[in-house]
């Protein structure tokens, strides 16, 4: 029963866009993560909200959540720069 529920959840329309599944995008991007785990976690969550922003729940709320997560990433980057550890 759990496996069937999981398959149904993964196949929900709001997780697929233009024939591309969100899990594949996340998996590919995470394969290159070496550090900055907090920023990458925020990135993953932001992408999820942006991916389905108008397909599930309140579109404005989804965009606001994505924006907040991106702000968290920027804050983390600024702290990293202040410590002299930034690549960019």
Image (cartoon, helix red, strand yellow):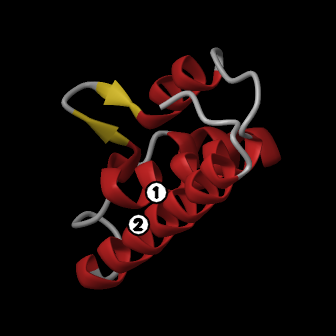
Q: Is residue 25 left or right of residue 40?
A: left
The residue lying toward the viewer, choosing from 2 and 69, is 69
- Label 2: few (<14), some or many (≥20) within 10 Å? many
Q: Is residue 1 visible from the viewing direction of this image?
A: no
CA distance separating discs 1 and 2: 4 Å
Q: Is residue 82 visible from the viewing direction of this image?
A: yes
Residue 31 higher or lower than 83, as above or below? above
The residue lying toward the viewer, choosing from 35 and 47, is 35
Residue 12 higher or lower than 75, as above or below? above
The residue pinned by badge 2 equals 66
Mark 2 secondary-structure assignment:
helix
Q: Is residue 59 left or right of residue 57?
A: left
Q: Quadrant of residue 67?
A: bottom left
Residue 56 higher or lower than 40, as above or below? below
* Image point (25%, 77%), residue name: 59
Residue 46, label in figure: 1
| Of the image marks 1 and 2, the number of the one nearer the N terminus | 1
* Image point (53%, 31%), residue name: 26
Q: Quadrant of residue 82?
A: bottom right
* Image point (56%, 27%), residue name: 87
x%, y% of residue 68?
46, 74
x%, y% of residue 35?
76, 30
Mark 1 secondary-structure assignment:
helix
Residue 18, label in figure: none
x%, y% of residue 78?
56, 57
Are the residues tagged 1 and 2 within 8 Å (C-beta)? yes
* Image point (46%, 40%), residue name: 11
């Amino acid at each position: 029963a759990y496996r069937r529920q999981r398959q149904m959840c993964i196949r929900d329309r709001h997780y697929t866009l233009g024939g591309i599944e969100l899990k594949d995008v996340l998996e590919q991007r995470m394969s290159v993560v070496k550090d900055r785990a907090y920023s990458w976690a925020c990135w993953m969550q932001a992408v999820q909200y942006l991916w389905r922003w108008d397909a599930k729940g309140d579109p404005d709320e989804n965009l606001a959540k994505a924006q907040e997560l991106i702000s968290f990433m920027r804050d983390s980057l600024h702290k990293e720069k202040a410590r002299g550890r930034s690549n960019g």
